[in-house]
Amino acid sequence: MNDDTAQRKATQSGIRVQEFLGRLPLFSMMSETELERIAAHTLPAYAAKGEAVFHAGDPCTGFHIVVYGQVKLGFHSPQGGEKVVEIIGPGQSFGEALMFLEKPYIVFAQALADTMLLHVAKHCVFEELAREPAFARKMLSGLSRRLHGLVKDVEAYSLRSSAERFIGFLLRDGGEEGAAPAQVQLSAGKSVVASRLNMTPEHFSRVLHELSDAGLIAVEGKTVRILDVAGLRGYGRNGG
């Protein structure tokens, strides 16, 4: 596909791809000319709720950025179970690591809601990395944050109780001392969040009841209202 065709398809998606890319941390320091080169090889893709973005074993031809919607990354166990590795929301990207390794996907990606993505072609990324060292540093920074998050996940699974893991999930946007959200939408679904936190759905339900009975949260469908931030943090530190 030539550059003009790519640009036309991107424009037909209803967003200005170059402007959207420029607002992302990964591309924020790029010049207009550099963003134009990236946008010329960036195509929109759509996935309806439940539809696969890619399957494990598919070739990796670039990386994806979520414009709206949600995507879960996961894998299937030999026993047929599913493990959710990560839930990707708007403005987040995925697939960079395997793109650099030039290996097929080792996880699947599935839309949790009607989702729009942008696919940035691998060859374009490699050309920019060769041309602009600052872009390489930003890519490395993003991959390092992803690795740090995975290490924190392993720590949480190994050393924290189920209640602590869920409390960390609820308060993740505000950090330990920052302002916590007044409520959290479990838009991915309780079973998906449970898998992401390495819990069975039944155990996840028990944790919800436990924290509700303690007066720390209120659960209304997929909405969790945080009633006592300090109490939640204290509950987490005390291990429930």
Image (spheres, rainbow, N blue to C red):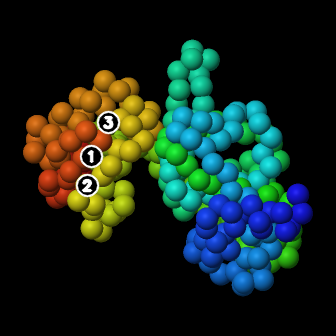
- Which disc, if any, is residue 162? 3
| Mark-to-mark CA distance, 2 and 3 | 20 Å
Residue drawn at point x = 76 percent, y = 33 percent: 57
Residue 170 locus on image (x, y percent): 31, 51
Residue drawn at point x = 63 percent, y = 48 percent: 46
- Which disc, if any, is residue 183? 2
Residue 97 locus on image (x, y percent): 71, 52
* Amino acid carrying mark 1 in the image: Thr
Q: Quadrant of residue 148?
A: bottom right
Q: Earlier in the sequence, mark 1 or mark 3?
A: 3
Taking depth in this image into account, of 219 and 204 the one nearest to the observer is 219
Residue tagged 1: 223
Q: Are marks 2 and 1 in contact (CB under 8 Å)?
A: yes
Which element carries disc 3, helix, strand or loop?
helix
Q: Are marks 1 and 3 in contact (CB under 8 Å)?
A: no
Which element carries disc 1, helix, strand or loop?
strand
Residue drawn at point x = 38 percent, y = 26 percent: 200
* Amino acid carrying mark 2 in the image: Gln
Viewer-nearest of labels 1 and 3? 1
